[in-house]
């Protein structure tokens, strides 16, 4: 039997090299110690001794963990000065989370979790689920969000901080309302202006739904078009397209720690 809702999950071709890179990426993030390090340096840079003290791990092991995080590009190091000691102040390497680092991790895991991995990739799928669960435990409390893919604002994150959120292109004649709107730039010309929303997000009983508000270009969830006024529940990793083509906008829905419903056998 196959799943009746195949439209919810994207099926993409991934070559062997990409799967190997994904496996290595997940290996780095599968360590709870490394995720603790990300949490420690999330707000301000720290040197190895400061980090090792906070995570209660030896200097040598902390350095090895940091090297692993550097290898996947979520951490950076820059020269800084140590805290004053009896021996004075001296130069040290300080480590910090790259801007948007956590969002990038969440985005990557959400996208890969939404793929139908073949049976030969069962170990990889299990590893992916484990990393997402660990990440959720270390960074609990983050709200669901939309992350914009491609275009002038690629990578921009829109946290969902209100039970009803309008989605559309900027309208100079209408002031924005912060958490109540997801406003895109004029570069996304095929998206309807937010004053007459392209789409609307609503939260009910902890679940998020999206509906098309009569837009010209249409709204698509994992390539399936939405009828005007029909609500579709969103799951972690779902791709939402506001119109098609280069002037449309594609966003990924991410729920920190969320797991998409599994396909029926």
Image (tube, helix red, strand yellow):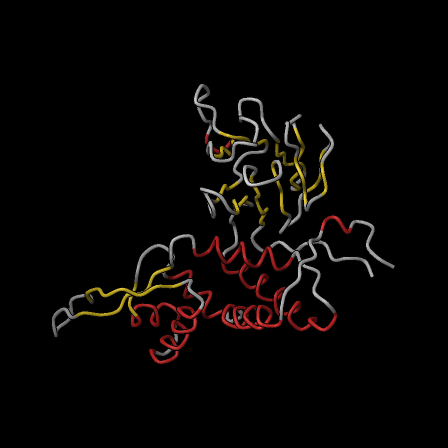
Q: Position of residue 259 (x, y in %)?
A: 65, 56
The image quadrant that residue 59 belongs to is: bottom left
Does residue 181 lie above or below 95 as drawn?
A: above
Most distant residue in the front direction:
246
The image quadrant that residue 207 belongs to is: top right
Query: Residue 206 vs residue 55: left or right?
Result: right
Most distant residue in the right direction:
1
Most distant residue in the bottom direction:
60
Residue at coordinates 49% horizontally, 56% vertically from top-left? 139
Residue at coordinates 49% horizontally, 71% vertically from top-left? 28
The quarter of the picture where the N terminus appears is: bottom right
Q: Position of residue 235 (x, y in %)?
A: 66, 48
Does residue 253 lie above or below 82 as drawn?
A: above
Residue at coordinates 65% horizontally, 35% vertically from top-left? 219
Does residue 104 lie above or below 247 as drawn?
A: below
Query: Residue 168 vs residue 57: left or right?
Result: right
The image quadrant that residue 44 belongs to is: bottom left
Residue at coordinates 46% horizontally, 56% vertically from top-left? 102
Most distant residue in the top direction:
173
Q: Position of residue 80 (x, y in %)?
A: 21, 64
Nearest the camera: 33 or 210? 210
Circle count: 0
The quarter of the picture where the C terminus appears is: bottom right
Q: Position of residue 188 (x, y in %)?
A: 51, 35
Nearest the camera: 50 or 98? 98
Query: Residue 235 vs residue 135: left or right?
Result: right
């Amino acid at each position: 039997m196959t799943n009746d809702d195949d439209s919810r999950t994207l099926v993409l071709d991934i070559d062997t090299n990409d799967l190997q890179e994904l496996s290595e990426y997940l290996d780095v993030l599968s360590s709870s110690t490394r995720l603790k390090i990300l949490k420690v340096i999330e707000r301000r840079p720290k040197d190895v001794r400061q980090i090792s003290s906070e995570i209660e791990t030896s200097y040598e092991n902390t350095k090895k963990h940091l090297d692993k995080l550097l290898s996947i590009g979520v951490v950076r190091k820059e020269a800084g000065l140590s805290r004053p000691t009896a021996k004075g102040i001296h130069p040290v390497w300080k480590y910090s989370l790259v801007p948007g680092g956590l969002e990038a991790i969440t985005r990557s895991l959400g996208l890969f979790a939404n793929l139908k991995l073949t049976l030969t990739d069962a170990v990889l799928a299990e590893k992916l689920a484990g990393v997402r669960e660990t990440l959720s435990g270390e960074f609990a409390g983050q709200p669901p969000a939309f992350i914009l893919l491609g275009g002038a604002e690629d990578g921009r994150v829109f946290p969902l901080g209100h039970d009803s959120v309008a989605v559309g292109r900027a309208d100079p004649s209408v002031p924005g309302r912060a958490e109540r709107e997801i406003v895109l730039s004029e570069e996304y010309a095929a998206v309807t202006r937010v004053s007459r929303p392209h789409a609307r997000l609503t939260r009910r009983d902890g679940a998020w739904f999206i509906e098309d508000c009569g837009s010209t270009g249409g709204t698509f969830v994992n390539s399936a078009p939405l009828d005007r006024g029909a609500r579709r529940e969103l799951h972690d990793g779902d791709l939402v397209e506001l119109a098609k083509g280069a002037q449309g906008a594609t966003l990924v829905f991410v729920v920190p720690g969320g797991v998409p419903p599994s396909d029926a056998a």
